Amino acid sequence: MKGKMILLLPLLLIAGCSVQYPPAGSLPAPYIQEKEQLYLAPPEQTASGFVHGRWMPYMDYGEYMAGRSGEEFRAAVRERYTAAGAEGIDTLYIHVHPCGDAYYRSDIFPPGTYLDGDYDPFGIMTEEAHALGLAVHAWINPLRCQTVEQMDALPESFIVKQWTGSGQAKEVGERWYLDPSYPEVRQLVCSCAAEILDRYDVEGIHIDDYFYPTTGPEWDRAEFSASGAADLAQWRRDNCTAMVKALFDTVREHSSSAEFSISPQGNIVADYDTQYADVRLWGGTPGYCDTIIPQIYYGFLNETCPFEATLHQWEEIVSGSGVKLVVGLAEYKQGKADKWAGAAGEDEWISDSGIIERQKKLTEESSAVGWALYG
């Protein structure tokens, strides 16, 4: 892990999600204030209210964060965000907590791997985005943590490292994941959201589709057995729902204006059967999220989830619920073979250069209130 490590300060973990921070006297000077007003006021929404979004993933930080000074990073961010605005983007989903780490100023999590400078990257990104009139949603992955190698290098002072020996964190392949069946895990996730909301003026907290990392029953066999539940799949869905509900309530508690959004995979059957995400409940019932942003990363000829039919399925889920629908679009697939699309759709993204524009148009004609691009 590059850069200076910020030692974990005591964190009170309780069953609910009413976050309590350590006493002010034990905190470093920059966080003694309840909430610092460091950045420009958030931008107004576009006149139409339609979201034109783009995800800004941490995997790209190696290109414009690693090895950069704060001012060099700021210049690179300004260049990217200016380009986004020029193509009509008005909303950014910025990765700040991708792998049990932090690309923001945190007292809970270690700095992200690409952060090797002594500056606050999310502070810079928020300031530059707002200066350009772009809305900022802090994108977190609640359960995905460090690789085995990265975790081994962490000091024992970090709670995620402590949990590798007690069940709350479990290994899958070469990476660690948190187990949402534990109330203290759900509390830690809420603490992440609260820390961001208390330190930055953002328009939202956003999570994507990293829920359960495996369908294997051995991963949480002991916890399931102790729960007394009869159906493993439903028990796991209930655990994810408890986490989602707690996050929604945390956002409400810490901000009067920020929204909470979820971006599950677009395949509804897979949401239920492989990641245990109860998307019909979350998107069809008030109180779990403000906006749902399914990743409808499929072409029109996809044999399992053709785009137009899948869009209509998601429209049905949110119909009458008050939950807003924004459609995730796979810009990164353009010009590439899609080996999971079936014989009819495998080469669609190669032969048809207008897929994304057609999908934008269909989205704009639907009941959705926006689209977001990945790629």
Image (spheres, rainbow, N blue to C red):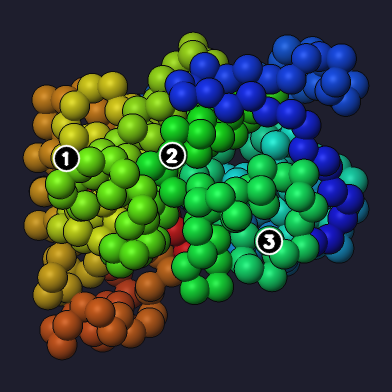
* Local crowd size for mark 3, using a 10 Å CA cut-off: few (<14), some (14–19), many (≥20): some
Secondary element at image label 2: loop
In the rendered image of this protein, does residue 322 appear above or below residue 6? Answer: above
Q: CA distance from mark 1 to mark 2?
A: 23 Å
Residue contact at pointers 1 and 3, CB within 8 angstroms? no
Of marks 1 and 3, the one in the foreground: 3
Secondary element at image label 1: helix
Q: Which residue is mark 3?
A: 151
Instruction: Please name the residue shown 11% across and 48% down the image.
Output: 312
* Local crowd size for mark 1, using a 10 Å CA cut-off: few (<14), some (14–19), many (≥20): some
Q: Which residue is mark 1?
A: 280
Residue 82 vs residue 224, the one in the foreground: 224
**Residue 87 percent coordinates (x, y):** 50, 51
Residue 35 vs residue 325, the one in the foreground: 35
Mark 3: amino acid: Met
Is tag 1's residue or tag 3's residue first in the polypeptide sequence? Answer: 3
Residue 115 appearing in the image: yes
Instruction: Please name the residue shown 45% across and 16% down the image.
Output: 252
**Residue 181 percent coordinates (x, y):** 38, 42
In the rendered image of this protein, does residue 34 appear above or below residue 15? Answer: above
